[in-house]
Image (tube, helix red, strand yellow):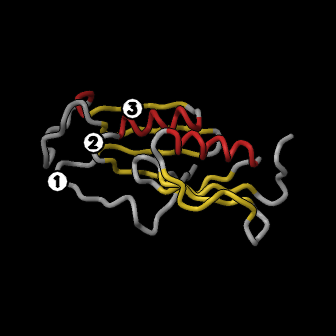
Amino acid sequence: MAQLATYIAFFGNAKEALEHYQEVFGGELDLTFYGDIPMPGMPFEPDPDSVAHGVLTLPGGVIAGGDMPPGGDYAVRDTVYSLLYTLDNVDEARRVIDQMVAAGGELAMPFELAPWGDHYGQIFDKYGVMWALNVPGSAAPSA
């Protein structure tokens, strides 16, 4: 079955970032380090403790990532990319936002009722990844 997943190249902190996302969202995390797999003929010498590939499987999707090769320069923050996370209720979205901000993230757009009827807001997590959180207008805040 075809599946689309987000893949993020990290600046040497993929393990920390993916473990942080697991703390925030839950799910099952599987990490493979460069030292775990033989890689003859690699065009670079990877740090054996760097993440070659990590997958966090959530009830609603997959976040994957790894440490970029030495000398890689993939910009994360201030790009046109963001991750849209749709939740069932406003309280859960606020919990996610609060947890990410408390861990060193930054609120980019307040989470509030948007003109189109959904609750919507944006944060940059401490890794520079922008998250847009959305709760459809039909989902009322929990009591």
- Residue shown at 33%/47% (left/top)? 10
**Label 2 secondary element:** loop
Q: In the image, 49: left or right of 61?
A: left
According to the image, label 3 marks what residue? 31
Name the N-terminal-most of marks 1 and 2.
Answer: 2
Q: Can you tell which mark lies on residue 71? A: 1
According to the image, label 2 marks what residue? 12
**Label 3 secondary element:** strand
Image coordinates for residue 106, horizontal then vertical, percent: 49, 52
Image quarter of residue 74: bottom left
Q: Nearer the viewer, mark 3 or mark 1?
A: 1
Q: Is residue 90 above or below residue 118?
A: above
Q: In the image, 40: left or right of 76?
A: left
The Cα–Cα distance between marks 3 and 1, rounded to whole angstroms, is 22 Å
Q: Is residue 77 above or below residue 116?
A: above
Image coordinates for residue 134, horizontal then vertical, percent: 68, 57
Name the N-terminal-most of marks 2 and 3.
Answer: 2
Q: Mark 1 is on which residue type?
A: Gly
Q: Residues within 10 Å of mark 2 (few under 14, many from 20)?
A: some
- Residue shown at 62%/52% (left/top)? 85
**Label 1 secondary element:** loop
Q: In the image, 42: left or right of 115?
A: left
Q: Closest to the observer: 62 or 104?
A: 104
- Mark 1 and mark 2 residues within 8 Å of each other at the beta carbon: no
Q: Mark 2 is on which residue type?
A: Gly
Image coordinates for residue 104, horizontal then vertical, percent: 45, 43
